[in-house]
Image (cartoon, rainbow, N blue to C red):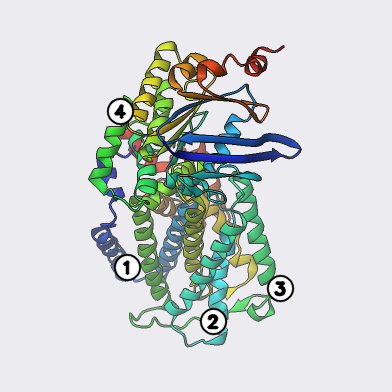
Amino acid sequence: MVSLAANNSRALPSFGGAPFVLALLAVAALLFGICRWIDNAYVFFVGYVVVQYIVLGTAWNILGGYTGYVNFGITAFFAIGAYSTVVLYKLVPAMPLPLMMLPGGVFAAIVGLGTGYLTLRLRGVFFSIATLALAVVVQTLFTNWEFVGGARGAYVLRPKLSPLIGGEYVQYLFLLMLVLCVIALAVARAIERSSLGYGFAAIRDDEAAAEAAGVPTLRLKLIATTLSGGFMGLAGAPLPYYVTYLDPSSGFNLNYAVNAIAMPLIGGTSSWLGPVIGAVLVGGLQEILRVTISSAANVLVAGVLLVAFVIAAPQGIVGLFRRAR
Amino acid sequence: MSALLHVEGLGKRFGGFIALDAIDLEVRDGERLGLIGPNGSGKSTLVNCICGTLRNELGSVSFAGQALNGLSAHERTRRGIARSFQLPRPFASLSLAENLRIPILYTVNAREAGHLAGPAIDQRCRELLAEVGLAEKAGRRPRDLTQIEMRKLELARAMAAEPRLLIADEVMAGLSHGEIDEIIALLIRLNAQGVTVIMIEHIMRAVMEFSQRLAVLVAGRKIADGVPQDVVREPEVVRAYLGE
């Protein structure tokens, strides 16, 4: 339990997040500096994946952890972001990648808003099933859309060198994902400390009681689905440049959904730190197993850890520390 | 005293079942109204229709001179109708103080008058908890509470919204004699501060002690409304409770 004193700041209208954002930026800069110093493309490839999962996990947590609506349709939003980039790459290949990412995020946010509207009467597991259906529908649409390669998939030629910062292009991708991660975490923490966070928590605990306490539950749920969907789309937007070849089975890979749910649950859903811990731990472990034991074993990690944590530590790692205090 | 709540011809069906049949009810500003009726008579359905949790098919509800039809529950709470739930529904993951913070942030602060900031909100939460005798447990979670404390939290959360009308839906069920007295005293104190109270209760001792006026629902119809001592002697009311 967070102490009451620590919670006082949560209700303040100002987010007071400037020092936090600066600290995040410092950590991100340090990470990037270390990776540059190691100077090995592999480090950037791994770093990109882990940071991408921090963003995905944080996005999932805004809806699933804070508001209590478990979204299984992560790949729908993620792939909308990725395929938006493919479309833009085909139409305006010269467009800078950060600009290319924006429409993906916006589209995914709009789909998030629409999903929120269409499922507003569904709660609990019924909401989850609806989001699962959404992933299937979106995948079917992209599989049958010839312009983005249909079932064959589409190639995206990655430039050899990074713009602005030099070095291999993957360094640039990693940097973009780091910046996105800083934004996502800053937003998540700002939510936690604002009245929005209290409203989300009230919805998660008891929607009827929240409504009776004056919480506009529908509007807040739509804010959550929109933000969550938007960040998932943004997380997926650089993917075509990372994999250089995007087909439905990779863009809609179940791993993204499993990891995006498992990581916040393992790290702890009550705080912005949870998805970070979960993504670093599970993502890191998966990568170690991938290179040491087998490339298939990494899927097992998230599954086994998820089961273990749900049974032994339902509040996640963050919860374990809070209890210890 | 003018009418604060005005319910006219209210009707609610669940499929073929008529839960409420043309209910007329008027509650004056500052009044203490008791609402009784056997199980399944439609008391909670009436509360839900007044509070916007359920939509009534027929009739109208107006509050402080304004029609409420079509307004969602949170908008009605903001206009000044607060309710407690029959079974306590606390926000389980939040501390007691945070439970009260929700209606302050979303109801009191959503109104035009007076916007409370951080320290003032904490102060208000402490005051409210002290008023119901839960001050020492401000940092605890609802799961640490006993039944009566849970009911008190439920009432405190309704009070935190600073309502003009408080609907207490069976807040005393399952409580001991002494605990019932405590809750009655609390509600009377609140009423003395100017809050109109509708008490829905099965415990007749509490209802008779508290109410200035008594309304009786049976099978979705209002069969009596008046001075409590007279109402409980009416043949139709006696028949509803004791049979022929």
Q: Nearer the viewer, residue A76 or B157?
A: B157
**Chain at tag 1:** A
Q: Earlier in the sequence, mark 1 or mark 2?
A: 1
Are labels 1 and 3 assigned to the same chain? yes
Spatial CA distance of label 2 from label 4 is: 61 Å
Q: Earlier in the sequence, mark 1 or mark 3?
A: 1
Q: Position of residue A161 (x, y in %)?
A: 41, 82
Label placed on residue B131: 4
Instruction: Say left or right for B132 vs B221.
Output: left
**Callout 1: SS:** helix
Place residue B96 in its image quadrant. Answer: top left
Q: Position of residue A77 (x, y in %)?
A: 55, 64
Q: Amino acid at mark 4?
A: Glu
**Could you classify mark 2 by the number of other residues whose Cα lies within 10 Å: few (under 14), some (14-19), or many (20 or more)?**
some
Report if the CB atoms under discs 4 and 3 are less than 8 Å apart.
Answer: no
Question: Which mark is in front, 1 or 2?
Answer: 2
**Callout 2: SS:** helix
Residue at 46 percent of width and 85 percent of height: A95
Q: Nearer the viewer, residue A223 or B158?
A: B158
Label placed on residue A88: 2
Q: Amino acid at mark 3?
A: Asn
**Chain at tag 2:** A
**Callout 4: SS:** helix
Spatial CA distance of label 1 from label 3 is: 39 Å
**Chain at tag 3:** A
Q: Amino acid at mark 1?
A: Phe
Residue at 56 percent of width and 38 percent of height: B48
Q: Position of residue A132 (x, y in %)?
A: 64, 55
Q: Is residue A267 visible?
A: no
Are labels 2 and 4 assigned to the same chain? no
